[in-house]
Amino acid sequence: MKLSTKGRYGLRAMIDIGMFSTEEKVSIKSIAERQHISENYLEQLIALLKKAKLVTSSRGARGGYSLSRASDKISLGEILRALEGDLNPVDCVTNNKDNVCEDSDSCATKFVWKKISDSINEVVNNITLKDLVDEQFEIDHLTQEAHIG
């Protein structure tokens, strides 16, 4: 499975919001500058995250975006599914009746795809945004130390 830029950039935006929205709301412009993502593309990604109720927004001079709930209550799986749709490697393991393969009941490979799908979902559902925010703070700290020393 390969994630699109929607998933990769959207996740970076969520980490950024998690890091910088504790004091005040975060603007699209500031996220775009820190993450090197176009503002127009970022607006599209934020709209998906807002629709999934992962971020909230407010207008005005102090407007911007913040997380809709605590970062330890938002899973990586929720974020990726909001941006990418389901994370199944093939359609035959989805619960969507429109995508069922006619050979699904007699196909040995479905077992493999189901195991891969279950593994992916288990991993992304057990990593929280807080885990990623903490990891980014640690990376930033080590990077700063390396530049100083």
Image: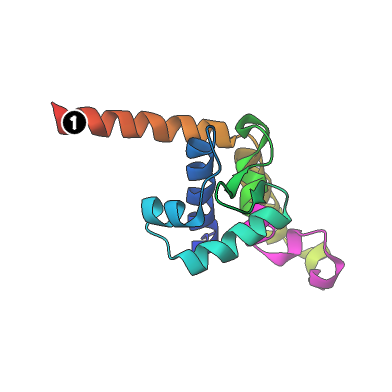
Tell me the quadrant of the picture where the N terminus can be found: bottom right
Q: Badge 1 is on which residue?
A: 146
State yes or no: residue 128 in magenta. Answer: no
* Structural crowding at the residue carrying mark 1, measured as other residues with C-alpha within 10 Å and reported as few (<14), some (14–19) or many (≥20): few
Disc 1 residue type? Ala
Q: Is mark 1 on a helix, strand or loop?
A: helix
User: Is there any visible trace of residue 88 in the rendered image?
Assistant: no
User: Residue at the spot x=52%, y=46% of the render?
Assistant: 26
Residue 25 pos. (x, y %) = 56, 43
Residue 109 vertical position relative to residue 100 in the rendered view, above or below: above
State yes or no: residue 95 in magenta. Answer: yes
Tell me the quadrant of the picture where the C terminus can be found: top left
User: Is there any visible trace of residue 66 in the rendered image?
Assistant: yes
Observer-nearest of 97 and 17: 17
Which segment is the magenta one?
Answer: 81-102
Residue 46 pos. (x, y %) = 60, 57
Residue 16 vertical position relative to residue 1 in the rendered view, above or below: above
Left-right relation of 36 to 43: left
Left-right relation of 137 to 92: left
Residue 7 vertical position relative to residue 23 in the rendered view, above or below: below
User: Residue at the spot x=34%, y=33% of the render?
Assistant: 139
Residue closest to the far left: 149
Residue 37 pos. (x, y %) = 42, 61
Observer-nearest of 138 and 28: 28
Which of the 4 image quadrants contains residue 148? top left
